[in-house]
Image: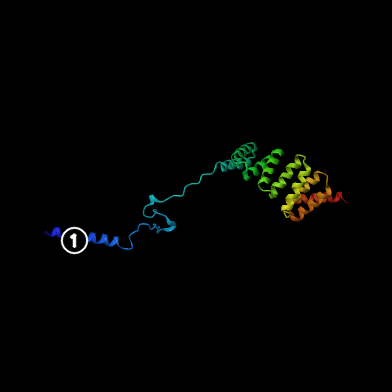
Amino acid sequence: MTTFQLLLLIIAAGVFYLFFKQLFSENFPKRGVDFEAKVSDEKIGGINRPDKTFSTPTVEPTRIEQLLKMADEAIEKEDFDEAKKALGAALIIKSDQVDALEKMGFVALKTEAYAEAKESYEKLLEIDADDDMAHVLLANSLHKLGEESKAKIHHEKAISLDPEYAPHHFNYANTLYDLGHTKEALDEYTKAYKLDSSLTVAKEMMEKLGSNNE
């Protein structure tokens, strides 16, 4: 055996020794044992292999979200026709979409489409009968439509749900004043102003109605 052959034999023996040592050691990954990432956030790659970093997928907005955004942009520009189109499309997709119904009611009131506003707020109350804002806005719509008895019911319901909210009293006072119920209107203006002294119009109406009742 030549010296070169002897050298090859020694190298081969060393390789086999290291292989079997690793095979039977505790450091060799075992079948059935889950791999545990050793880097932060359990990321595989990104340190030694940047090309293997897993990226977070971009969440695309839903069609309803897109339509609501379009409606918001149109409302900001006071383009209420475009806002109605976007909101109508959203409600075709999902007829009980709360944001779309609220915005549709708002747009309807702004354009004096009180029957449409009434429909939107009635649907909102079907979803949540204790929505005080839906009650008061429905009351305002009903008042504009001349449905006064129903308007009073919804004003009073809104107040019962949130008696500390001054605008509920102020809105009811306006309806009562329009109906000629000045004493009741004065009471509601007074309550509104006590709850929120920034309502200067309520104070003005108190002074006006107070002097009329003297």
Towards the viewer: 102 or 16: 16
**Residue 173 placed where, x, y %?**
78, 48
Left or right of 33 in this view: 135: right
Mark 1 crowdedness (10 Å alpha carbons): few <14, some 14-19, many ≥20: few
In this rendering, does residue 140 appear at all?
Answer: yes
Q: Residue at x 72, y 52 (%)?
A: 161
Q: Is residue 44 left or right of residue 134?
A: left
Quadrant of the image containing the N terminus: bottom left
Q: Position of residue 111 (x, y in %)?
A: 69, 38
Q: Residue furthest front?
A: 32
Which residue is tagged 1? 10
Can the viewer see residue 112? no
Whole-percent x, y for residue 25 in the image: 31, 63
Residue lying at 77% horizontally and 54% vertically, measured from the top left: 191
Quadrant of res 115: top right
Residue toward you, 33 or 151: 33
Q: Residue at x 83, y 47 (%)?
A: 182
Task: Say above or below: 147 vs 187.
Answer: above
Q: Count numbered badges in the picture.
A: 1
The amino acid marked with disc number 1 is Ile
Here the colouring is rainbow
Foreground of the two, 145 or 189: 145
- Residue closest to the far right: 214
Which residue is drawn at the image coordinates 76% and 44% (left, top)? Answer: 151
Q: Secondary structure at mark 1?
A: helix
The location of residue 150, given as percent across then percent down, is 76, 44
